[in-house]
């Protein structure tokens, strides 16, 4: 054997196994910390403290009548927080379903509840769902859980229509679920290979959806370098994305590992009205741009807004951002509420000071790419 062959067939595979073993250990430690200390801190300290505020600048629990936890399935992490508004409003869709991010491997609904309490102040009842994590539960398991949660809303809660909101990895799961629900042939194909029970499930109608700095495809971000961050920061971010994707992908090649919205667009003939939001300092902005462009070119009602911010700018508690939230999270919150409130109405968002989108409609401060 040549040295090159030994390197490729023996050394490199051994190094990759060591790398993923180490990465998996780190992921599990971070997840344990989030599931224990940070979940406790959120529930017992952060949320009840009236001095803490949300992305809209108001006390985090203002307008929230109660928060309860229910189980929507029998698998690991198939739980759902329900945030009931103090004063439901007639001009808001009844239900907003939130799918949290975390690279498919960490985080949970509890530690990100502060990101969605603001919607209660606008009359939404928020269902914030958890789902199984990779690498223990790889694709398609998390997507099946999200679909199972939406079926639970339809069957057990008698909810017929929803607005949908996902961030980061959650944006991909949410958008994949909405694509499956609105395209029966795609759902049938997925169900036949991955979970036959899905073919017999009923789901709510999706009136509109927001995808926040989503992990929407497997390629576009690989070569994209945001101009306002250093080369080192960009390289570290992309390495983290590659690692999360590798831990998420099916080792058996389920559904040909078409695990991202960008992988199934050729099979999408119907898609809900969608707003993509991203940070221009985030390599994943390329992912939102690519999917938005593809859907827009095919005539779907899709929009995109970018802010001068890094990945996760909406999920961090505002008080941790040294005022940066006022330039990104705050206007993003206003835009999302305005967009989702229009979800039950025909046509597009029209607001004072709005600028035209590439599809001819108007969204406040919308950036046209």
Image: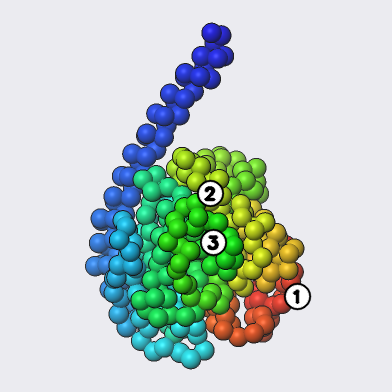
**Label for residue 360?**
1
In space, the residues marked 1 and 2 are separated at their CA atoms by: 35 Å
Q: Is any part of residue 278 visible from this angle?
A: no
Q: Is any part of residue 44 visible from this angle?
A: yes
Q: Residue furthest top?
A: 1
In space, the residues marked 2 and 3 are separated at their CA atoms by: 11 Å
Q: Residue furthest bottom?
A: 90
The x and y percentages for residue 269 are 66, 65
| Residue at x 58%, y 56% (from the top left corner) | 261
Q: Secondary structure at mark 2?
A: helix
Q: Which residue is mark 2?
A: 255
| Residue at x 33%, y 64% (from the top left corner) | 73
In space, the residues marked 1 and 3 are separated at their CA atoms by: 30 Å
Few, some or many residues within 10 Å of mark 2 (<14, 14–19, 20+): some
| Residue at x 53%, y 67% (from the top left corner) | 181
Q: Who is closer to the viewer here, 109 or 137?
A: 137
Q: In the image, is residue 195 above or below residue 64? A: above
Q: Which residue is mark 3?
A: 187
Q: Who is closer to the viewer here, 140 or 246?
A: 140
Q: Who is closer to the viewer here, 159 or 111?
A: 159
Q: Secondary structure at mark 3?
A: helix
| Residue at x 56%, y 53% (from the top left corner) | 260
Asked if the residues shown at circle 1 and circle 3 are in contact, with their CB atoms under 8 angstroms apart, the answer is no
Q: In the image, is residue 40 above or below residue 356? A: above
Mark closest to the chain's N terminus, 1 or 3: 3
Q: How is the image coloured?
A: rainbow
Mark closest to the chain's N terminus, 1 or 2: 2
Which of discs 1 and 2 lies nearer the camera? The answer is 2
The x and y percentages for residue 354 are 69, 79
Which of discs 1 and 3 lies nearer the camera? The answer is 3
């Amino acid at each position: 054997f040549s040295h090159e062959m030994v390197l490729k067939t023996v050394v490199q595979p051994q190094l990759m196994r060591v790398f993923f073993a180490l990465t998996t250990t780190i992921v599990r430690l971070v997840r344990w910390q989030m599931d224990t200390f940070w979940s406790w801190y959120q529930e017992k300290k952060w949320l009840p403290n009236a001095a803490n505020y949300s992305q809209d600048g108001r006390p985090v629990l203002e307008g929230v009548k109660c928060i309860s936890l229910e189980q929507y399935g029998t698998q690991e992490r198939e739980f759902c927080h329900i945030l009931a508004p103090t004063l439901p409003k007639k001009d808001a869709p009844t239900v907003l379903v939130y799918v949290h991010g975390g690279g498919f491997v960490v985080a949970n609904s509890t530690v990100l509840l502060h990101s969605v309490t603001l919607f209660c102040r606008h009359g939404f009842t928020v269902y914030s769902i958890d789902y199984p994590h990779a690498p223990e539960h790889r694709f398609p398991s998390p997507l099946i859980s999200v679909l199972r949660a939406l079926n639970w809303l339809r069957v057990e809660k008698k909810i017929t229509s929803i607005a949908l909101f996902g961030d980061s990895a959650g944006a991909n799961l949410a958008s994949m679920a909405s694509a499956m629900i609105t395209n029966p042939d795609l759902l049938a194909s997925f169900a036949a290979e991955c979970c036959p029970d899905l073919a017999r499930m009923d789901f709510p109608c999706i009136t509109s959806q927001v995808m926040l700095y989503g992990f929407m495809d497997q390629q576009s971000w690989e070569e994209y370098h945001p101009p306002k961050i250093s080369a080192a920061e960009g390289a570290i971010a992309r390495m983290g994305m590659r690692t999360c994707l590798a831990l998420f992908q099916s080792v058996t090649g389920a559904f040909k590992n078409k695990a991202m919205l960008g992988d199934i667009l050729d099979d999408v003939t119907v898609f809900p009205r969608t707003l993509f939001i991203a940070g221009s300092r985030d390599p994943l902005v390329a992912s939102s741009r690519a999917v938005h462009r593809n859907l827009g070119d095919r005539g779907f009602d899709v929009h995109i807004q970018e802010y001068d911010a890094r990945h996760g700018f909406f999920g961090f508690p505002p008080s941790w951002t040294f005022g940066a939230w006022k330039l990104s999270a705050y206007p993003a919150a206003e835009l999302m509420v305005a967009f989702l409130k229009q979800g039950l109405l025909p046509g597009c968002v029209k607001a004072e000071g709005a600028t035209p989108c590439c599809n001819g409609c108007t969204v406040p401060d919308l950036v046209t790419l």
